Image (tube, rainbow, N blue to C red):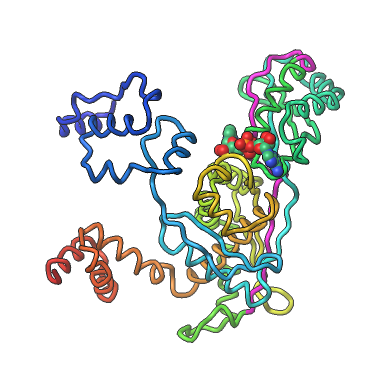
């Protein structure tokens, strides 16, 4: 324990006797767990009520994770203006950060002028890894695995997952990987996961083929698990924006200049990892929000997208250039491991409702929409960054949050926020002064 943590405990004598050992906690029902935690942590009634959940959601969240005591409500916004492959679409987004949904809607509006987004996906293929150690002759073992590829594919497809839904294991590859612990063999199953994200299904398959792989390699199978670097499950989206759409009446620059500054901003991200990280964070703002709203695994998307962006040096997931006709040509390519079945997508009532808003027909269409959304978000952010900056758009909601932090009563939040924005002074202490003044 660090000195800082010890001091923190010393300052909180009420917690000194509380320890985190709660025998059989996981066997209690959710309500009892919440009472136990409330009791140990001296939660107020309001805090308990804020965590508590009821109805269908209570039963579902209890079944989704472990030691569940309640659930947390995130704002679900709906991004407008999207045309994806010729179809109008409303896009549900669950995110606590202000301006993310507004930027997606703005980006989609920019793309809409020239027909919206066109998308394509490379397929729904995930890689499952069987990791083999202590292999006597790794190169010969790799070749023996390839010789037995057909039997391995057959065994993977005998595990009772995916095949009846049109998916299944399609191929086997093997590599020798030089590591600090010596050479190892990595056997990859390439699995078409159909409309599922597929992690559980692929994990079942790699566990199922492990004995065959052990026999073929003469080594010891260790890890058997999906890879989140879904580079055979890429989604792409493109759009064109006429330069005049990039400016409005207030702008003192012309559309061509804003267009060129956007291309410069992309080139900067392409050349500079500090900028690229934030550029891609902006893309993931939207991608994750759609994943959370639809019950998809946003950690998998994060892992996959950043690993993909890092191949050959960390770089932006989007591209911008000036087309022959002078339009801004925008593109994105990213690995999208999402499903319309499985996981929480079809179980959580709010995720089901979000899928109802989205109205996509299968995982490929969802992946294309994810790509279009990521591109829309990035386009709008870059346009704002090279123009008025992002704080102007952020400020109203941010100021309202600062007002709430300063305990502004609900009927004063907007006014306190508006005054702080007008003064250009958005601070909690200023909000408190204004609350005192206006109350
Ligand atoms: P799942 O097992 O819940 O659903 C997949 C199953 O749905 C398939 O096996 C199939 O039997 C069935 N199915 C029904 N209709 C289908 C269709 N049209 N297409 C495909 N399958 C269909 O979930 P999953 O998608 O295998 O795994 C996703 C879950 O795994 C997520 O909750 C994720 O968080 C979790 N997970 C992720 C990782 C990781 O990313 N590294 C690891 C472990 C688990």
Expressed as whole percent of the image width and height from the top left, the position of residue 277 reads 52, 52
Q: Residue at x 69, y 57 (%)?
A: 236
Q: Where does residue 126 sit, x and y in percent of width and height?
A: 70, 39
Closest to the observer: 230 or 275?
A: 230
Indicate left or right for 408 with 270 as reference. Answer: left
In the figure, 105 relative to 188: above or below?
below
Describe residue 268's horizontal placement relative to residue 417 as left or right.
right
Q: Is residue 37 left or right of residue 269?
A: left
> In the image, is residue 19 part of the stretch drawn in magenta?
no
Q: Is residue 230 magenta?
A: yes
Q: Position of residue 195 (x, y in %)?
A: 69, 45
Q: Quadrant of residue 127?
A: top right
Query: Camera-side residue: 158 or 188?
Result: 158
State the extent of the magenta-drawn residues as a range: 215-242
Q: How many marks?
A: 0
Q: Residue furthest front?
A: 55
User: What residue is at 68 percent from the left and 14 percent from the top?
Assistant: 220
**Which quadrant holds residue 188?**
top right
Q: Nearer the viewer, residue 108 or 9?
A: 108
Q: Quadrant of the N terminus?
A: top left
Instruction: Please indicate, yes or no, whether residue 73 appears anywhere in the rendered image.
Output: yes
- Rendered-image quadrant of the C terminus: bottom left
- Give ligand 1's quarter of the image: top right
Q: Residue at x 23, y 31 (%)?
A: 39
Picture coordinates of residue 86, whole percent (x, y):
70, 69
Residue 321 seen from this side: no
């Amino acid at each position: 324990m660090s000195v800082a943590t010890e001091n923190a405990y010393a300052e909180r004598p009420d917690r000194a006797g509380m320890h985190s050992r709660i025998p059989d906690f996981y066997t209690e029902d959710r309500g009892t767990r919440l009472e136990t935690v409330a009791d140990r942590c001296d939660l107020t009634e309001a805090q308990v009520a804020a965590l508590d959940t009821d109805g269908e959601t209570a039963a579902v969240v209890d079944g989704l994770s472990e030691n569940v005591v309640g659930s947390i409500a995130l704002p679900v916004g709906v991004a407008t203006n999207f045309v994806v492959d010729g179809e109008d679409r409303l896009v549900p987004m669950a995110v606590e950060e202000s301006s993310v949904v507004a930027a997606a809607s703005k980006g989609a509006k920019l793309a809409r002028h020239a027909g919206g987004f066109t998308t394509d996906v490379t397929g729904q293929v995930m890689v499952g890894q069987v990791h083999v150690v202590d292999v006597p002759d790794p190169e010969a073992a790799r070749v023996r695995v390839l010789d037995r590829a057909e039997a391995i594919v057959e065994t993977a497809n005998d595990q009772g997952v995916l095949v009846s839904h049109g998916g299944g294991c399609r191929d086997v590859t093997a590599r020798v990987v030089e590591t600090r612990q010596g050479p190892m063999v990595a056997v990859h199953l390439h699995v078409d996961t159909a409309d599922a994200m597929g992690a559980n299904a692929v994990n079942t398959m790699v566990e199922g083929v492990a004995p065959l792989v052990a026999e073929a390699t003469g080594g010891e199978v260790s890890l058997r698990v999906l890879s989140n670097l879904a580079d055979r499950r890429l989604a792409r989206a493109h759009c064109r924006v006429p330069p005049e759409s990039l400016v409005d009446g207030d702008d003192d620059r012309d559309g061509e200049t804003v267009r060129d500054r956007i291309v410069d901003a992309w080139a900067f991200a392409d050349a500079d990892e500090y900028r690229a990280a934030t550029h891609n964070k902006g893309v993931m703002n939207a991608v994750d929000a759609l994943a959370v709203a639809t019950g998809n695994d946003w950690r998998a998307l994060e892992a996959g997208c950043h690993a993909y962006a890092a191949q050959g040096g960390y770089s932006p997931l989007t591209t911008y250039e000036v087309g022959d006709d002078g339009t801004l040509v925008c593109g994105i390519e990213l690995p999208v491991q999402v499903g319309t079945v499985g996981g929480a997508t079809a179980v959580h009532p709010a995720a089901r409702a979000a899928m109802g808003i989205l109205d996509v027909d299968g995982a490929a269409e969802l992946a294309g929409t994810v790509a279009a959304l990521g591109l829309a978000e990035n386009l709008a952010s870059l346009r704002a960054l090279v123009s008025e900056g992002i704080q102007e758009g952020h400020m109203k909601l941010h100021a309202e949050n600062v007002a709430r932090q300063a305990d502004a009563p609900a009927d004063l939040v907007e006014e306190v926020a508006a005054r702080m924005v007008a003064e250009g002074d958005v601070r909690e202490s200023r909000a408190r002064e204004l609350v005192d003044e206006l109350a």
